[in-house]
Structure formats: C-alpha cells, structure tokens
Amino acid sequence: QIEVDHDFGTGIEGVYAIGDVIPGPMLAHKAEEDGVACVEKMITGYGHVDYDLVPSIVYTEPEVASVGKTEEALQDAGIGYKVGSFPFMANGRAQAHGHPQGSVKILAHRETDRVLGVHIVGPCAGELIGECAAAMTFGASAEDLARTCHAHPTLSETIKEAALAADARAIHF
C-alpha cells in the first residue's frame, strides 16, 4: 500500500494515489470517491471522503450490506445506542417475490437518535443501503428515516419499519 497525506499526495511532487493502493477498503465506489476528492482538492483546495460512511456489499443470496458502525464498535467505544430491527418476512414485497429471508437493523445513538450504522441481510440489500448512507451523510436520525414516506409495496419500507422499531414503534411487526 502507498501511504498518502490528507490531499492524497505520495510525498513525490505531483504524484497522487487513490483507490486500492492506499489504506482503506478495496471497493470500486470508495476508489471513485477518492478520485473525486483528490481532483477537487487539486482544483479547489477542498475535497473529502467520509470513510466511516462507505457502504459495503456482499453479493450473495441473500445479499449483505452495511454502512457505519457495528454494535461491537459502538460497545468498544462506550457509545450508548438503541437497535431497531425489521424482518423481510413482514414485508409484503419480499413475500410476494418469494424472498422473505433476512432483516434490516438500524443502530441509533441512544440520546440523539442519530443513525450510527445500518446492516441489511436480504433481497436487494445493496440497493437499499444507499438510502441509509445518504441519510447518515446528512446526520439523519432514526426518526427522520421513520417519517420519510416510503412507497408501498416496496422493500424500502423495511428501512422505515426498522427505524420505527428503534423506538419500539414498528407498524407491521
């Protein structure tokens, strides 16, 4: 791996490094963000990648996706959190398509309700995690996700329901 500074510089004048050759997850979308941030820094002096909010996806059956902190990381850091979980078996779209396995789990700060992590195992997890990453990028709370109108019948309703469950208010389970 190539060590870089906060501007992606390698220590050699005019030579920068991004993506899989620098520390961090080896993910195409992370490399793309590195590239954009690197060029933005060169041109404007600004550019940023929040490596805590790079989603990770495993393309298995069912899919697995996550963004943000895990329960273990929150426990190790001594951060109080609450959990909202919702199973795909309680979602009409998942049932209709014959893919009711898995669940959505939202970890929210115990005091502020800010979403700290989202973990999904189930159909289209890789597609669903994007909403969560966007919400977390802008500091959304579980309540923000819960109050967002999700179309019916869709798999995305599992995110709303998990957010509601973080406050023991899930509607369909």
Image (spheres, helix red, strand yellow):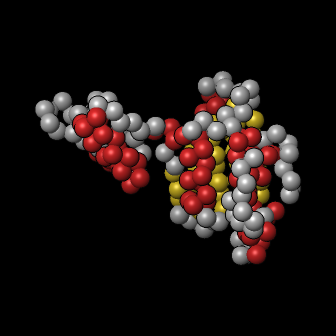
Residue ID at (82%, 39%): 167
* Left or right of residue 171, residue 11 in this image: left
Closest to the observer, 70 or 53: 53
Q: Quadrant of residue 93?
A: bottom right
Residue ID at (24%, 36%): 42
Closest to the observer, 130 or 83: 130
Total labels drawn: 0
* Left or right of residue 24, residue 22 in this image: left
Residue 10 appears at what percent x and percent y?
21, 34
Residue ID at (33%, 45%): 36
* Whether residue 168 is visible: yes
- Residue 39, compared with residue 27, is above or below; it is above
- Residue 112, compared with residue 70, is above or below; it is above
* Left or right of residue 132, residue 163 in this image: right
Residue 32 appears at what percent x and percent y?
36, 51
Which residue is most to the top? 78
Closest to the observer, 171 or 19: 171
Q: Quadrant of residue 112?
A: top right
Residue 147 appears at what percent x and percent y?
75, 46
* Whether residue 100 is visible: no
Image quadrant in which the N terminus is located? top left
Residue ID at (27%, 42%): 39
Which residue is most to the left? 13
Image quadrant in which the C terminus is located? bottom right
